Amino acid sequence: MEIIKIIGIAFIALVIIILLKQYRPEFAIYISLLTGILILLLVMDELKGIITLLQSLASKASINSSFLTLLIKITGIAFLSEFAVSICKDSGEGAIASKIEIGSKIIIISMSIPIISSLLEIILKILPT
């Protein structure tokens, strides 16, 4: 099971970070960053499977593929920004973390405008005039 690998890697990294903070605290953030990247790499196969499934469902339901691509990009931005925010908070940079959160939210909103516009057009077509 993948989750056991992920938890194992996280616990090993945690022990290394705790031991490293006693002697070289500046290297603890590098271990944390490396652990996060390793965990992301471990779940990439699962993510590819999810994307493939979503694409096949979208084609069966005749959903515009550009909307699906956009939703996948938005989800990726949310995951990556959360990863960056966590790293910043772990290193004690809460101010930078909050700026990343604000920036990513603005980007996500701007990217979702075509989907919102399309939904509003559909709603306006359904409503009686």
Image: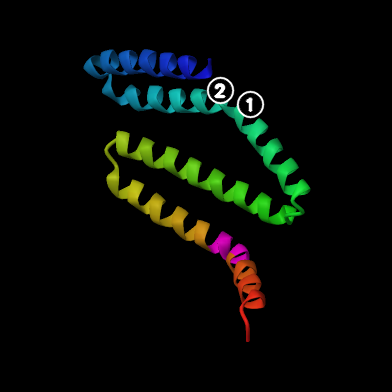
Judged by its main secondary structure, the magenta piece is: helix
How many badges with numbers are in the image? Answer: 2
Question: Residue at the location (64% across, 35% down)?
Answer: 50
Q: Nearest the camera: 101 or 59?
A: 59
Nearest the viewer among 62 and 86 is 62
Residue 83 drawn above or below residue 61 = above
Q: Is residue 99 above or below residue 56?
A: below
Q: Are marks 2 and 1 in contact (CB under 8 Å)?
A: yes
Residue 71 lies, in percent from the top left, at 61, 51
Residue at position x 61%, y 67% in the image? 119
Q: Is residue 121 located in the magenta-colored stretch of the structure?
A: no
Question: On the image, numbered disc 2 is attached to which residue?
Answer: 42
Residue at image point 40% right, 50% down: 100
Residue placed under numbered mark 1 in the picture = 45
Are there few (<14), some (14-19), or many (20+) residues within 10 Å of tag 2? some
Q: State the residue in front, 8 or 50.
A: 50
Q: Nearer the viewer, residue 68 or 78?
A: 68
Q: Which residues are magenta?
A: 110-115
Residue type, mark 1 in image: Asp
| Residue in the picture at 77% in, 48% down | 59
